[in-house]
Amino acid sequence: MSRLDVRKTYKLYIGGAFPRSESGRSYEVVSASGEFLANASMGSRKDVRDAVVAARSALRGWSGATAYNRGQVLYRVGEVLEGRRSQFVDEVAAAEGLSARAATAHVEAAIDRLVWYAGWTDKVAQVLGNLNPVAGPFFNVSIPEPTGVVGVLAPQGSSLLGLVSVVAPVIATGNTAVVLTSGDRPLPAVTLGEVFATSDLPGGVVNIITARTAEVAPWLASHRDVNAIDLTGAAGVDGLVWGELEAAAADNLKRVLRPAIAGNVAVEPDWSADPGLGRLRAFLETKTVWHPKGI
Amino acid sequence: MPTFEYAPAPESRAVVTIEKSYGLFIDGAFTRPKALFDTINPADERLLAQVTQAGPRDVDKAVAAARRAFDGKWGALTGAERGKYLFRIARILQERAREFAVLETLDNGKPIKETRDVDIPIAAAHFFYHAGWADKLEHAGLTPAGGPTPRPHGVVAQVIPWNFPLLMLSWKIAPALATGNTVVLKPAETTPLSALLFAQVCQQAGLPAGVVNIITGDGRTGQALVEHPDVDKIAFTGSTEVGKAIARSIAGTAKKATLELGGKAANIVFDDAPIDQAIEGIVNGIFFNQGQVCCAGSRLLVQENVHDQVVARLKRRLETLRVGDPLDKNSDLGAINSRAQLDRINRLVDAGVDEGAQRWSPECTLPATGFWFPPTLLTGVAQTHRVATEEIFGPVLSVLTFRTPAEAVAKANNTPYGLSAGVWTEKGSRILWMADHLKAGVVWANTFNRFDPTSPFGGYKESGYGREGGRHGLEAYVTTSPRSASPTTGATR
């Protein structure tokens, strides 16, 4: 007699814990070929608000951690992800309808991207900051600082590589994140939450909400305690107009990273391309400090 | 304390010629004046000149001229040649500095010693600094080595406020031109004259037609300009309210924007501060330009145990400030820029007194005509008072207290704004700790209100986004993505 599977329950990841949606709702997640995979929590407006509170609480500690420490933690995330590689290959293959070989390439690229960003944490200030030679007896230095709590609409298509590519640059510089996963392909994101939970990443630094993007994204965009929003995942969502999210974000002058545009249409970026510094820059503020020189 | 009488020492008006009326500067030439409105001297309410209210068709023409210049002669220039135009402009501003200083003082109401020693020299310095960037953009760290060269956006719409008319113009136009963009700029309704004189400087420098266009008018003109479909980028300095409206209006478009908006800066004085320097810094922080400065140190946070001493010394210092004729070289404070602004200051100060603050001003005789407000201290201010939360934009200092550095940080950051902050203490490690924790784009430690073209300026939170000046300021005026290829990320605004 064959053994009965122990199935996994996919929940949200908020403040370092794995709660169900406060709404009590869940939805069926199916594979690219239409087979039932699991039930996922259907996150709500209240879940978004709870996640923002968690992200705000985590901000002081995470932004105050040394860049070296953040690099260590991000690298640790890469290590733990590597250890779970086969699980992610299965989930990505099912979610995206990829062959095992193609899914493996995506998972490996995601791990490598984490390692790449891990190395950036203690170089960003050196590359993006500088001394300014002002015309007077002053020491004057400009340094990048994290913007704060960043709402992230993760891409709808690339369930792991794309997700890692948008989350890693946000947290590498000391921001904390509230992530809305791909609506139809949320499962690798929940498993990534398990990786975060076991990688020395403090609870609340990344919060992951599985939800119908069009329903929940407007609440994230208009939330007054969110400092910036990445609209990458607005591409390809029925019933969601990214310009409306940007307009809502103007209420408290959130920094907005617009979706990639091809022609006149929001599209998902090519995640295999060199990411450059754009995503790191998007969620940084420049602070300039003056002090007189004298004896 | 002995008091000294000062004989009047007025700067001569003869150095500047003001026309009776002005048209718009479009495509290298002035249009015929029409739909005129007055610009007055706020120090005596006398008419200075009449200027043109630009309508939507004028905006169309200005944007079209800027587009032609971008697609044509200006776009074809090398960076080195562009830079040489900027160097020329910088030199002409230096040569005509006194003329600009007098004109700015007449139109704005600020003391001649500020326009002469701050506004105009720093404006010239901005052109000089950015001139040198024009042919070095690939070294600005905006793109990786071997990557695409930073490219201009195209036509930039720029709307500037009345508090530093020529200086704000230079903050806007110099980086835009250095990076290869063309410009349509609208000066503030109450201070259009130095921008119109700058248009003559562009002619004098031989700048190709359409590269810089200056259109005058009120908020309607500004709105038509920023909403014009053929504008690629917007640079705005002004109120947070209008900044939010601009952010909404460009949502979902390809337009970029940088916004430099309001502030409510805390100037934090610890008990070990160099007290004489701190008093000078506090005075400079809030009474420079009559406090009509977005980064003004309008909230004084004093450590509780030195509160009485600091307030007593401040009062003594304020009694020596000279308020009066802005053209007089001895004047420390000039006129408020407009009746509307004076009304706003009066309203907010009255509200502060209603809420329980104590109001104090030194004895000073204010001129009978013009818009005047004496330097004012409000003590006993609570965190919740309107004068502690709303931008007054006038010579009014709200005084609050704190006990610990953590409390000072909490109070300083307890505002939707985040433009600037000041810290006064002799303890180096505390300065750096405070600088780390203050959520502000500029932190002045043991100094205040310093500006330099090499030093990026701009805010956190609702003080806007983007930086102006320095290497960082170039970022807003270029695109760094490859010309075609598949997109790797979206664009920030």
Image (cartoon, rainbow, N blue to C red):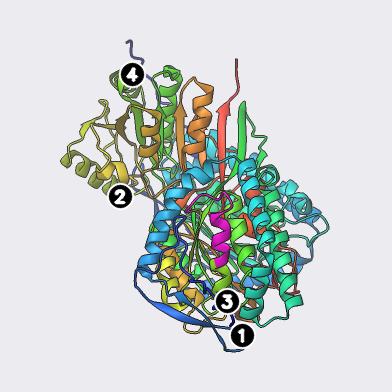
Estimate how packed mark 3 is, as few (under 14), some (14 to 19) or many (20 or more) residues with alpha carbons within 10 Å: many
Q: Secondary structure at mark 3?
A: loop
Visible residue check, residue B221: no
Up the image or down, B198 lies above or below B352; here it is below
Disc 2 sits on a residue from what chain?
Answer: B
User: Share a chain, discs 4 and 2?
Assistant: yes
> Residue flagged by tag 3: what amino acid is it?
Gln
Up the image or down, B102 lies above or below A283; here it is above
User: Share a chain, discs 3 and 1?
Assistant: yes
Q: Nearer the viewer, mark 1 or mark 4?
A: 1
Q: Nearer the viewer, mark 3 or mark 2?
A: 3
Disc 3 sits on a residue from what chain?
Answer: A
Give the left or right position of residue B100, taking residue A78 as reference: left
Q: Secondary structure at mark 1?
A: loop
Asked if disc 3 and disc 4 are in contact, CB closer than 8 Å, the reply is no
CA gap between label 3 and label 2 equals: 54 Å
Return the mark for residue B313.
Answer: 4
CA gap between label 1 and label 4 equals: 74 Å
For marks 4 and 2, the one nearer the N-term is 4
> Residue flagged by tag 2: what amino acid is it?
Arg
* Residue matched to label 1: A32
> Residue flagged by tag 1: what amino acid is it?
Ala
Q: Give B88 or A32, whichever is nearer the viewer.
A: A32
Q: Position of residue B56 (x, y in %)?
A: 48, 74
Estimate how packed mark 4 is, as few (under 14), some (14 to 19) or many (20 or more) residues with alpha carbons within 10 Å: some
Q: Give B87 or B480, whichever is nearer the viewer.
A: B480
Give the left or right position of residue B268, taking residue A119 as reference: left
Q: Position of residue A119 (x, y in %)?
A: 71, 49
